[in-house]
Image (spheres, grey):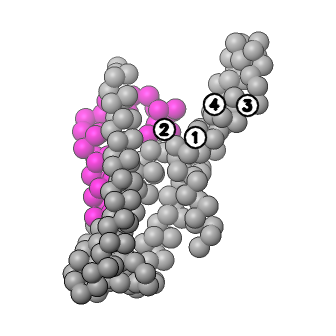
Amino acid sequence: MFNRQTSTDQSWFIHLSWAGALLLLNIGFLCSAAILAIRSITWLCTTTGLLLHFFLICTFTWMALEAYQMSMLMWRRNHASLKGYGLKVCFVGWGVPALIVLSIVTIKKDSYGLNGDMCWVTNNIVSCISVIGYFGLVFIFTTGVLAAVLCKLTQIWLASKQAMKEKRSSCEYASTFLGLVCLLGTTWGLGFFLT
């Protein structure tokens, strides 16, 4: 049986985790600027670069999980009542980025440090694969989910007699579209196309 409260709690958990990853990314970015003033402590810059990379990948992962949650709410309403769903989502959201960063550190220990004007990934190939490549996959996934959800919502609105009577304005459709674009993090795609 579908438990509406469980589904709502899972959505808030994903929103909160995504916001937490973004907050930690921004705090790390601000700390990186302060750490550059103390260039003599190299381990601090290395740790900051590692944490910045981790939180950026976490942000992308939670963005993909948000898209997954939205698609499941549209097509499979009882997925959130699955046993251990929150723990599985948490493992993917925080665990996958940790595995990526730990594998980078294991393969090449000096992958993090001072790179130009910030503490970041020092190897450009690692940076391209783990940031641009990873985001590219997330971007394709979230854009696909966005298109599918918008098609489903359009079908629901067109099938509804009330929608036909009210003749919903294009502004309402546009605001829904922009809200979903922001929610799924598709606006990050602007940065992807700028690189």
- Provide residue 110's location: percent of width, then percent of height: 28, 86
* Region of the chain picked out in magenta, as a range: 69-98
Q: Which of marks 3 and 2 is nearer the N terminus?
A: 2
User: Disc 4 residue type?
Assistant: Leu
Residue 192, percent from left and from top: 58, 66
Can you see residue 104?
no
Residue occupied by mark 1? 180
Query: Looking at the image, is mark 2 or mark 4 earlier in the sequence?
Result: 2
**Which secondary structure, mark 3?**
helix
Local crowd size for mark 3, using a 10 Å CA cut-off: few (<14), some (14–19), many (≥20)? few
Q: What element carries label 4?
A: helix
Instruction: Tell me which label, 3 or 4, sits earlier in the chain.
Output: 4
Residue 18 position in % (x across, y down): 38, 48
Provide the residue designation for mark 3: 171
Comparing 133 with 169, the one in front is 169
Q: Main secondary structure of the magenta part?
A: helix
Q: Name the residue under label 4.
A: 153
- Residue 41 on the magenta segment: no
